[in-house]
């Protein structure tokens, strides 16, 4: 009886799609976070460089 239950449980594939979606979604969220922080760091560096260039001109 228990052996039959374990074989049926092992062969059941109904939750596999849900697990795939969770893994894919978490990977997309993780890559989005990495991309966001990369762009954020680059934009702060660009703002600092632009501010330094404007301040160096002394036209005002």
Image: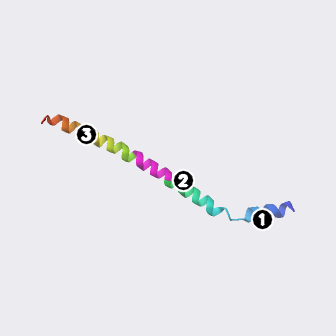
| Upstream in sequence: badge 1 or badge 3 | 1
The residue identified by callout 1 is: 8
| Upstream in sequence: badge 2 or badge 3 | 2
Q: Horizontal placement of 51 versus 34: left or right?
A: left
Proximity of marks 2 and 3: CB atoms separated by less than 8 Å: no
Label 1 vs label 3, nearer the camera: 3
Question: What residue is rendered at 72% in x and 65% in y?
Answer: 12
The residue identified by callout 2 is: 26
- Crowding at label 3, few (<14), some or many (≥20) Cα neighbours within 10 Å? few
Question: What residue is rendered at 42% in x and 50% in y?
Answer: 35
The percent coordinates of residue 48 (x first, y second) are: 28, 38
**In terms of depth relative to the viewer, which is nearer, 45 or 7?**
45
The residue identified by callout 3 is: 49
Q: Horizontal placement of 45 versus 38: left or right?
A: left
Magenta stretch: give its range.
29-37
- Crowding at label 1, few (<14), some or many (≥20) Cα neighbours within 10 Å? few
The percent coordinates of residue 1 (x first, y second) are: 87, 62
Question: What residue is rendered at 73% in x and 65% in y?
Answer: 11
Q: Picture quarter containing residue 2?
A: bottom right
> Compared with residue 35, is residue 5 higher up or lower down, i.e. above or below?
below
Proximity of marks 1 and 3: CB atoms separated by less than 8 Å: no
Helix, strand or loop for disc 1: helix
Find the distance from the CA under tag 2 to the CA under tag 3: 35 Å
> Compared with residue 60, is residue 26 higher up or lower down, i.e. above or below?
below
Find the distance from the CA under tag 1 to the CA under tag 3: 64 Å
**Residue 33 in magenta stretch:** yes
Q: Horizontal placement of 51 versus 6: left or right?
A: left
| Upstream in sequence: badge 1 or badge 2 | 1
């Amino acid at each position: 009886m228990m052996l039959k239950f374990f074989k049926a449980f092992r062969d059941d594939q109904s939750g596999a799609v849900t697990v795939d979606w969770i893994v894919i979604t978490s990977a997309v969220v993780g890559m989005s976070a990495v991309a966001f922080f990369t762009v954020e760091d680059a934009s702060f560096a660009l703002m600092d460089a632009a501010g330094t260039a404007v301040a160096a001109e002394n036209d005002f």
